Amino acid sequence: MMKKPIRHLLNRHPAIILMLLLIFLASCGGGGGAQKRVQDEKLREVKQSVSQNIHSARGDIQQRITYLDEQIEEAEAEVREQLEAYRDTLQQQEERLSEELKLVEEATLETWDSVLAHVSDVIRTTRSKTNEVSLAVREMLEGE
């Protein structure tokens, strides 16, 4: 009984059925939009994680700069110049991380892999340089 009206509708009004089907598919988003949203959400989460790593490294550098500023105030002229040079090195590293943070924020799905590789390398280099400076400062102050 139900088959007859549906068959009648299909035979007499195929354009209407096709239009309803297209409206239904369009409202579902076709599936590709959902995948893009998931990828965008994952990218946002990874960006947030990398940004936190950068902020952590910057915070560490800022603490070390604060420590150096305290030591510079108490240091003699000879040592003060070297400590100021170390502070400048740390400030350069902090600025470099600020630039990398901008790259992370501007990254897209298409550029993310290369940005992540670059930023990871910069973070690793910055931490290494920061540790070298801290070691040199410690050795210099212990020798004083």
Image (tube, helix red, strand yellow):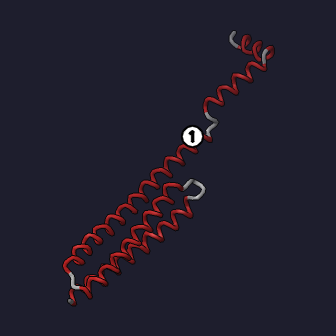
Front residue of 72/6: it is 72
Q: Position of residue 100 (x, y in %)?
A: 47, 63
Q: Position of residue 56 (x, y in %)?
A: 34, 63
What residue appears at the point 40 percent right and 71 percent down from the top-left corner?
Answer: 93
Observer able to see residue 139: no
In the rendered image, the residue lying farthest to the right is 12
Residue 96 shown left or right of residue 2 in the figure: left
State whether residue 42 is above or below residue 20. Answer: below
Query: Where is residue 14, by image quadrant?
Result: top right
SS label for mark 1: helix
Residue beneath disc 1: 34
Front residue of 39/9: it is 39
What residue appears at the point 21 percent right and 76 percent down from the top-left corner?
Answer: 73
State whether residue 122 is above or below residue 46. Answer: below
What residue appears at the point 52 percent right and 68 percent down from the top-left corner?
Answer: 118
Front residue of 115/66: it is 66
Query: Where is residue 80, by image quadrant?
Result: bottom left
Q: Position of residue 134 (x, y in %)?
A: 30, 79
Residue 67 shown left or right of residue 12 in the figure: left
Q: What kind of residue is marked 1?
A: Ala
Front residue of 4/133: it is 133
Observer able to see residue 42: yes
Q: Position of residue 126 (x, y in %)?
A: 41, 73
The quarter of the image holding the C terminus is bottom left
The quarter of the image holding the N terminus is top right
In the rendered image, the residue lying farthest to the top is 1
Q: Mark 1: few, some, or many residues within 10 Å (few <14, many ≥20)? A: few
What residue appears at the point 62 percent right and 29 percent down from the top-left corner?
Answer: 27
In the rendered image, the residue lying farthest to the front is 77
How many numbered discs sit on the rendered protein? 1
